Image: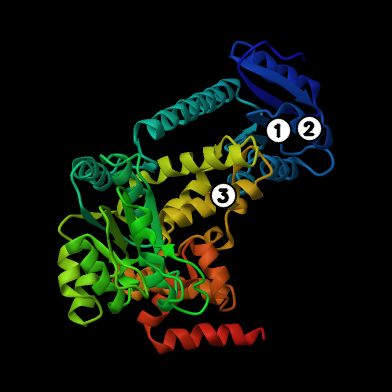
Amino acid sequence: MNPSSAGLKMLIVHDDPEIIKLVCDALGGENIQLFTSPGVESAFEQLTQIHPQIVLSDLSLPGPGGMTLLDRALANDPGIDFILMGHHSTESAVEAIRRGASDYLPEPLDVERLRNCVRLLIEAGTTRRKTFRLDQDLVDIFQFRGMIGRSPLMLEAFAKIRHIAPHFQTVLITGETGTGKELAARALHDLSAVASAPFAICNCSALVETLLESELFGYVRGAFTGAVQNKQGIFEYANGGTVFLDEIGELPLSAQAKLLRVLQNHEVQRVGSPVTHYVDVRVITATHRDLPKMVALGQFREDLFYRLSALEITVPSLAERKEDLPLLQRHFLDKYTKRYEKEITGITRRAQTRLAAHSWPGNVRELENTISSACMMAVGPVIDVADLPETLRMPVRVTDIASQGLISLEAMQQRYVLQVLRQVQGNKAKAAEILGIGRNTIYQMLSRMGETAEALAESEANKTA
């Protein structure tokens, strides 16, 4: 039968021409393009050519059968709505639904039930397309300087950034690793009066202590071996603009004293020089560490902490704003389908369920890495569970969590980090990649967990040595 001129595409698979005619007559008034096939192999060829949204197939097809076609169709395109029809059998119906069928229609075929089933699928498809367009619009509406969120916590953070940006001299941004603290810092700079001036970044955890001060404050020729010429530091480079010091909690005490002098006197002194240079910079710092606790332990200067924390912005973790997950998924899906030049239209419901159940210890960075990886792995028009990283493919067992009792979010994150380390045989670089966090963060978390966790991670690594 030739397809009609409009509507969703539907493939009817049956070896009985009378049944095919019955179905086509029953659905002739619907806004559907109808295609037909007599068997599994020809049907699969059409699946790859016409990409139907709905498939109606006989269970007892010659050869491999309808269940095989169901498996192959969903493996090729998990977004297909697949209807099986066959003789009344509770076992067959349950098995069909378990394997991903949208419905099971008993024979002899009830024409009215068929129409209702197809209409419901058409309505669901229409709803999904509307939701897709709305999600696109919502991503644009709730995007703020590269950050995306409609949760109360994120909207509060956005409002605070807008309010602070024109006036701040120092700001402390707090939040877990991977939440987007650097994006918040860039937003503060971009909305400030010095937006056209330099924005200099220094990750305090990425530099060894011997190089950190020269990176921040510069050095003069001959100050140390290898200093063959004068070099300005980040503060001099950013004069008139903004300096962003990420992971400020990792700054050594000696550098903390010099930073306090910059904040109080607007003066920097290059390593190896008695001369001071005046600088006019705004300073944004960020950390995932508990600075008040570090102050109490003598690991962070109290006077510097109070100077930095006069204005503070907290970027919430992804676990605290799960309502933003669909928007972030859509944003990253658009970003990486364009980057990888793929035609991926969405994420299956079961894959979305796995994503929603995940605790996201690596926060937005982990989610971005997950969607990026899934876009690379996907071979069809939608991302399915099989395209997700291995750690997300297995559903979370509620009984496991319940048996552990109520624990803190940090403890849950620590257990998940250990679980990932076990699965990668203690490879911290691989674990950091999966979690979307830095290797330094892995070491810091293991350090906080104590020697037992470190020994466990090392023993897992030694098993494969």
Classed neighbour count for the residue bearing mark 2: other residues with Cα under 10 Å, few (<14), some (14–19), many (≥20): many
Q: Secondary structure at mark 3?
A: helix
Q: CA distance from mark 3 to mark 2?
A: 32 Å
Q: Are marks 3 and 2 in contact (CB under 8 Å)?
A: no
Q: Quadrant of residue 97?
A: top right
Residue 152 percent across, percent down from the top left: 24, 44
Q: CA distance from mark 3 to mark 1?
A: 35 Å
Give the mark nearer the N terminus: 3 vs 1. Answer: 1
Viewer-proximal residue among 62 and 185: 185
Residue 210 percent across, percent down from the top left: 42, 78
Above or below, comparing residue 215 to residue 156 in the picture? below
- Residue type at mark 2 is Ala
Q: CA distance from mark 2 to mark 1?
A: 9 Å
Q: Are marks 3 and 1 in contact (CB under 8 Å)?
A: no
Q: Quadrant of residue 301?
A: bottom left
Q: Nearer the viewer, mark 3 or mark 2?
A: 3
Which residue was labeled with disc 3?
372
Residue 63 horizontal side relative to residue 447, left or right = right
Viewer-proximal residue among 402 and 190: 190
Q: Is residue 179 visible?
A: no
Q: Are marks 2 and 1 in contact (CB under 8 Å)?
A: yes
Above or below, comparing residue 29 to residue 318 in the picture? above
Which residue was labeled with disc 1?
57
Numbered tag placed on residue 43 in the rendering = 2
